[in-house]
Image (cartoon, rainbow, N blue to C red):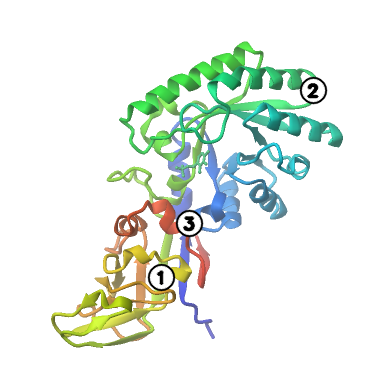
Amino acid sequence: MPVMTAAVAQIDLAAYRRNLALLSSLGSELLVVVKANGYGHGMVPMAAAARQAGVRWLGVAQLDEALALRAAGDTGSILCWLTNENSDFAAGITADVELTAYSVAELAQIVSTAQKLQRQPAVQLKFDSGLSRGGARNEDWLELVTQANKAERAKLIKVTGVWSHLACADEPEHPENFSQEAKFRQALQVATNAGLQPKWQHLANSAAALALPSARFNLLRCGIASYGLSPIIDQNFDLTPVMTLKSRLLLTKKLASGESVSYGHHFTADREMQLGLVPLGYGDGILRSTSNLAEVQVNGVRCRILGRVCMDQFLVDVTAANAKTGDEVILFGPGKSGEPTATDWAMHGGTINYEIVTQLGGRITWEYHG
Ligand SMILES: *Cc1c(COP(=O)(O)O)cnc(C)c1O
């Protein structure tokens, strides 16, 4: 007997491999970002599929994510970048995770931990070229690269990379991109002058990898594009969305003209309609802000949400879909058969496609194909 689940997130690994091949063809080495549970696709299975496809680097934000990859058996290069001087570097160093130092204090903590463990970890240095998030500011950069060079000459660490992150890459024409790229080139020069020879130099996320060739350097840190979603509005770059989110109608019923639907009665019928109930809600990551706006596909027909999305369920207009209880509901997919995409949901929810897939959870089951 098949287990009844509220919904299934089907992950198309063949599509994932196509996206990885496209990103690999851009001319630089590829680092695939699998943080935040692989943007909601499942970190460990996506990481394993990436390695099988020959991906050299994986990237995560937190040390715990890197350790989870190691615990799942991953033995390749992993870069981690959201740590500080209070992080527990011992586990990361022991597990051969490449660390990122933002500051002299963080570097010192990495070095002293490595000395205690008698290991020589690979460390990358992050320069803040204008995002004003992590990384060393320009006035602190010379000291950071100088200290890193000292530690490297003492054989306490290996400095394997220097990198930065763009603020406006999803707007390829934005002048800040060129300003950040120029500042990054200067920072690389300062690092080289200080005696470092970082093998990996990287600035590009998915948007820059696809749309800003001069920002590619020799490594691309791609998250969203690997999952087949475009970081840039109105351009899809031949990417194939990897996730299809499906459910089934829990019931269908009549709505008479003049009757209203769901909490607050934010939709009122002006004619007789047929309602379909989808057993998913904001408890599963379906944004409440898509109420009355987003569409699903039932029997090949687009059906709009009626009224508010609730915690466990929402209603759709299946009047034109000739629908009955148990019929399949496609919330979003690649969009190749008329179904909505995660990007469509993002537009209705007032957000970006990253958030639509990353927040999924609750009672959804993940299935991997291909
Ligand atoms: C999340 C992240 C990325 C990936 O960004 P995408 O837009 O998903 O490609 C790259 N670099 C850093 C530092 C990140 O935090």
> Reading the chain from its start, which is encountered first: label 2 or label 3?
2
Nearest to the observer: residue 219 or residue 265:
265
Residue name at image x 36 percent, y 53 percent: 351
Is label 3 in a helix, a strand or a loop?
helix
Nearest to the observer: residue 37 or residue 287:
287
> Reading the chain from its start, which is encountered first: label 1 or label 2?
2
Residue 155 is tagged as: 2
Left or right, residue 262 beside residue 360: left
Residue to which mark 3 is pinned: 358
Is label 2 in a helix, a strand or a loop?
loop
Q: Give the quarter of the figure containing the N terminus.
A: bottom right
Label 2 CB sits under 8 Å from any ligand 1 atom: no
Residue 337, above or below 173: below
Nearest to the observer: residue 94 or residue 166:
166
Q: Position of residue 138 (x, y in %)?
A: 54, 21
Q: Please, what is the three-letter code of the amino acid marked with disc 1?
A: Lys
Residue name at image x 39 percent, y 54 percent: 241
Q: Position of residue 305 (x, y in %)?
A: 28, 71
Mark nearest the camera among 1 and 2 is 2
User: How many angstroms separate mark 1 from mark 3 (CA)?
Assistant: 16 Å
Left or right, residue 51 beside residue 172: right
Residue name at image x 53 percent, y 43 percent: 32
Q: Say few, some or many: other residues with alpha carbon within 10 Å of mark 2 (under 14 / 14 to 19 / 20 or more).
A: few
> Reading the chain from its start, which is encountered first: label 1 or label 3?
1
Residue name at image x 33 percent, y 26 percent: 175
Q: Position of residue 303 (x, y in %)?
A: 25, 72
Quarter where residue 294 is shown: bottom left
Label 1 CB sits under 8 Å from any ligand 1 atom: no
Q: Say few, some or many: other residues with alpha carbon within 10 Å of mark 1 (under 14 / 14 to 19 / 20 or more).
A: many
Does the residue at mark 1 contact the one at mark 2 (Cβ under 8 Å)?
no
Residue to which mark 1 is pinned: 246
